[in-house]
Every structure is written in C-alpha cells, then in structure tokens.
Amino acid sequence: MVTPTARRGPENSLQRKDREFIWEVAGDHLHGRRPLATTRIPTAKRRRPLFSHGHGLPPNGIVPHPGIKPNTHEGKPNYNGAPTPPPSPSQSVFVKTQKTRAYSKRFQVKFKRRRQGKTDYRARLRLTNQDKNKYNTPKYRFVVRFTNKDVTAQIVYATIAGDIVMAAAYSHELPRYGLEVGLTNYAAAYCTGLLLARRVLKFRDLDQEYEGNVEASGEDFSVEPSDERRPFRALLDVGLIRTTTGNRVFGALKGALDGGLDIPHSDKRFAGFKKDEKQLDAEVHRKYIYGGHVADYMKTLAEEEPEKYQSHFSEYIKKGIEAGGMEALYKKVHAAIRADPTLAKSTKEPPKTHKRYNLKKLTYEQRKASLVERLNALNSSAGADVDEDDDE
Amino acid sequence: MPAGHGLRSRTRDLFARPFRKKGYIPLTTYLRIYKVGEYVDVKVNGAVHKGMPHKFYHGRTGRVWNVTKRAIGVEINKQVGNRIIRKRIHVRVEHVQPSRCAEEFRLRKVKNDQLKAEAKARGEVISTKRQPLGPKSGFMVEGTTIETVTPIPYDVVNDLKGGY
C-alpha cells in the first residue's frame, strides 16, 4: 500500500500549474532495485521515484475517475535525463509530468497576445513604427477582422497607453442600411469598409472633399489629393489571415478606397485578378462587390438542388431576396451608407451589475491601515506586559 | 592568436539580453518621441544590430541634438587625453531610453511656478531657492531613566564555562 511520506510539500503544491516531478518511494515496490535517477537534493526537498501500482488511494487522497486515462510517455526522456518510468495503470490519475521545475524556471513566455494567437508582432512593429522626425503624428491602421458572423473595420492608432480606435464599423450595423442577410460575404465586407471610410471622413470633415468612387465599378481606384487638404491616410492591417487573391479583407479594402481613404495598395489581391495576364478583371471584381457570386450560386442551387437551396438560403428566402435583385439591393445599401454614415447610439440599457459574491481586493492603503489597527489593538490588550530581555 | 580589438570586442555580456527577455522587444521603445535638447540614456539592445553605438557609450547620458527617421543624434561627453570632447553620435531608438536625470528639475520648475503664482496672488514675495539642511536644533532628552553601569568582578569559573 502506498503510504504518503511525511516529507511532502503542502497540498496546494500538487495542484500547481507548472507541475513538478513528485516522486515517492514505497520500499516494497522496488523489489531490491535501485530507485530511478534522482539528483542529489537537500533532504528537505528530497523527491524519490514513484512506482504507482495503483494500490489504494493516490497520495493526495483524490479518488481517480475510472474514465481518466494516464499520459503514456513511453520511451520519451524526461527533462532531467532519467528514462521514463513504466506507464501507470488506468486506476492512478496521478501521472508523471514532463516539465521539471528547472524547465519552468527558465521558460520565457511569449507576449500575451502572441500566446493567445491574436497578434503578429512582426507586422505590428512595422505598422506602428512612426518616423521619429514626425514626432507625435499618429500612424493610422485600417484594421479588418472577421468573426464567424461579423466583420469589424476600425481605424486605430497606437499610443504607449494602448491603441486608440478612432472610428469603427461593424457589419451588424448594415441592417440599418437595408442589408439583413449575408453579413460576412465579400459584398458585406465592401459595405463595411465603405461605411467606415465615410464615417471617418465625416468625423474629420473631409467627406465633402473626398467623395471617392460613388459608382463601384471594380476598377482600381485611388484617391486624388485635392488642393487644400490631403487625404486621410491609413495602412491596411490584415492581422493573421492568409492574403490570398479574392480574400474578403480586400473587399473591405476596396470599400474603404471607394469611400475616399488613401490606403497604399495594389490590385493584385482583389477578386478577379488573373495571375496569367497579371491584370485585374474589373467586371469580375464588380460582380463580387455586388454579390454576384452569391447570386450565381443561388441560381444554380435553385435549379439543381431545391431542398439544399431552401436550407442554405433560408434567410434570403424569408426576406424575399432573389438572385436577380442582389445588385439593386447592394446599390441601395451603398447609397444609404453615403447618405448617413454617422454612428447610431445604441438604445440598449447598460447590463445589470450583479451583487458581488467574493471579497473585493483591498488597496495598499487599506491594507496598511487595517494592519495599524490590528497592531494598536494588540498593543493595548497586551497592556502592562513588559518586554523581557533575553539572558545570553 | 592574439585577441582582437574590434568594434564589439569584449561585449559578450554587455550586449547580451537579460534573462528571459530575449526575442521581440516591446513596442513602447518605438512609440516614444524625443525632442532636441532632451536628456537620454544610451543603453544598447543586443537584439537590434543596426544603429548600435560603440560599447564606450553604453550607460552614458547625453542630450539630443538631432532627430532622424529611425535614429536619434546624441551628444555625449568623452574624456580624450587631458580634455573632454562633446562627441556626437547617431543611435537607433532601440538603444536609447529617456533619462530621468532632469525629471526632478522639471517637477521642481512646475511646482515653483505654481508657488510663485500663488504668492503673487496673495501679494507676498517668496524665495523658491533650495536650502541645504542646517544643523539640528537643540532638544531636551525626554522619558529616559538613568542606568549606572559598573564593572563586575572577574569570575573565572563562569567565564570559562564554554571551553578552554
């Protein structure tokens, strides 16, 4: 029966995230063999090999769930160089981990956003680095991100305190302009980019000067700088997506360009660029901007697989949107966006704040004050006790 | 073969990145702005190879005399022989930190301006000069008891109890 030695650390150390080797010897299981490699550690922290043969409860008293299978690391060396002990049977939930304390101590974590897989620092560095002889001039980024059901377009600039978002547009605002379905396709991305551009220009009082391309034709369009004020310049920030030709990110880019922003770009990645001819087919691009590719698919499905058409485009059918009416619909949406790009205040109430169930963390001053109180209480209760000097 | 005296000789530890701080450098260093006349510390960042100053300038503080696209011109004093020369070097921003040597002065300036403005409003004339600490004023010693310490006669047995 494995008996826990008295020489283990406190219970919490077993649940620590960076798990250590916790080895324990039970003499009868060794059968006269030497314990597996242990480095010479001072007695207070001595750990010895564990051969858990599944007898009785594991040392920390947790009863293993029968469904849990142990980690089998057969043949893989541990970090302290010792060969792996034989895999423990399914009854034992306590499995040897491969990360020694030494490994954890030397491990350098990546930046938090890199660990979360959200930020590409190499790209971010090059996007936010401003020339020093431009001092405080912000370098604006046109940030486009896609979620499963939404498109986010923002104009952001970086400060030491954190990034500041100057303006943002989401595709879930498009219902306000008449587009209810298909909020993450190329056409919706175009609309979102357009909305953001008009919003920013309005915010900066540039919208009269820089109309951009009112009639979306799919051709490569760049803003011409006017005489008085220079156009609003931003740099495209794609994030972590793969920049393939026809990606929706470039749909949003096209929307912003046609809206009147100055974003350095090339037409190589717009939908409809033919690699063989090295030219953008404006017709194809225009089709994508007006949802033509979706309309084509709707038509083919309706003819060949009506049930799939019903299930796939159910929302479109409910709203009464037909393949033929796509272009007109998007034209209306573009016009509505140009008419009023201002942000609508949300009419939702702020969420209810719930009662606090855990203790609130005290500030440094509060902790010091409470300590002083406790000491005063102790001193007064101690009263007439005189400190006795130790006799040496 | 003798040891060389190249540009980066003897900098194995000096230019090494600190423990667990290798890799990408945080973006704050790139977002800081420097104006001509400010004081900066030169501290080499071994991860960036361009625009590195010579190892002599590591740890020196100087004033900014020029600002270019990616670098700062810093004017640092260097003793050459029997004189001190004001050397002008260009250093990339990764190897530069804003210096706090002038911070106390700047704060004091602001506070003094404020005090003077308040005094003017009251109609008084005040001196905002810093004064050195003078000698401590006299005081009576309170709450003490007098304990007379006298030597005790030497006791051989007790003193040798530990050992010989």
Image (spheres, rainbow, N blue to C red):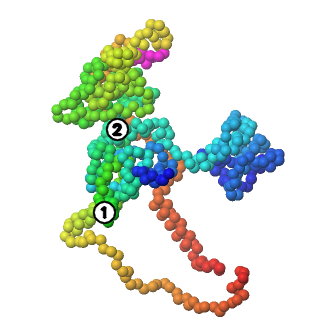
Q: Amino acid at mark 1?
A: Ile
Res A61 seen here: yes
- Please, what secondary structure does the residue beneath circle 1 have? strand
Q: Choose between A168 and B75: the one closer to the eye.
A: B75
Q: Residue at x 38, y 18 (%)?
A: A275
Residue B107, located in which quarter of the rendered image? Answer: bottom left
Image spot of residue A140 (x, y percent): 32, 37
Q: Is residue B100 above or below residue A255?
A: below
Q: Is residue A272 above or below residue A196?
A: above
Q: Which numbered disc covers residue A156?
A: 2
Q: Residue at x 50, y 51 (%)?
A: B1
Q: Amino acid at mark 2?
A: Val
Image spot of residue A166 (x, y percent): 32, 38
Image spot of residue B129 (x, y percent): 27, 71
The chain containing the residue under callout 2 comes to A
The chain containing the residue under callout 1 comes to B
